Image (spheres, helix red, strand yellow):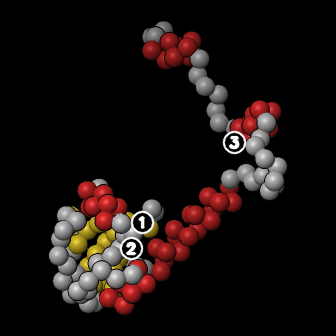
Amino acid sequence: MRLYKTRTLAAAACKKSQLLVNGQRCRAARQVRIGDEIRMRQGLLERVLEVRGLLTRRVSAKEVTAYLADLTPPEEVARVADIERAARESTPLREAGTGRPTKRERREIEGLSESPPEPTFEDFVRAFVKR
């Protein structure tokens, strides 16, 4: 089945255990059967697919959907969409055409995130010295 754009990406997903067939790790050359459940991780989303038919030759990605049934719960898709939307909204935006930020602007942008100050060497030593 064609689930990835290239065979290299598919093989890498198998190595990282991002692709499971019937709940088990698989190799890139694994033969699938009708009725097999395929779980594939795409970023934060874990898609669940069921094989409905077998292909005799390599076809385009649009034609593969006729041979697969997407069993991914809609709640999971909505959850991932909410996370991605929140990530897009939380990043500061610059107006189009303003170019690269200056050093002063970068410092102001970094100041917006307000991360805690970096501990000094004295703080580090105090953490290990018993009083």
**Label 2 sits on residue:** 47
- Please tell me in which quadrant of the rendered image residue 84 appears: bottom right
**Label 3 sits on residue:** 113
Q: In this view, does 49 lie above or below 108?
A: below
Q: How crowded is mark 3: few (under 14 residues within 10 Å), some or many (20 or more)?
A: few
Question: Marks 3 and 1: which is nearer the front?
Answer: 1
Residues at circles 3 and 1 in contact by the CB criterion of under 8 Å: no
Residue at point 68%, 53% (across, down): 91
Residue 27 showing in the rendered view: yes
Residue at point 75%, 43% (across, down): 100
Q: Where is residue 98 in the image (x, y as percent from the top left)?
A: 82, 49
The disc labelled 3 sits on which kind of residue?
Ser
Residue 18 showing in the rendered view: no
Q: Which disc is residue 120 wearing?
A: none
In the image: residue 94, left or right of residue 80:
right
Q: Position of residue 128 (x, y in %)?
A: 45, 15
Q: How far apart are marks 3 and 1 (CA)?
A: 28 Å
In the image: residue 5, left or right of residue 100:
left
Q: How far apart are marks 2 and 3 (CA)?
A: 33 Å
Residues at circles 1 and 2 in contact by the CB criterion of under 8 Å: yes
The disc labelled 1 sits on which kind of residue?
Gln
- Identify the secondary structure beneath mark 2: strand
- Identify the secondary structure beneath mark 3: helix
**Label 1 sits on residue:** 42
Of callouts 1 and 2, which one flags the residue occurring earlier in the amino acid sequence?
Answer: 1
The disc labelled 2 sits on which kind of residue?
Arg
Of callouts 2 and 3, which one flags the residue occurring earlier in the amino acid sequence?
Answer: 2
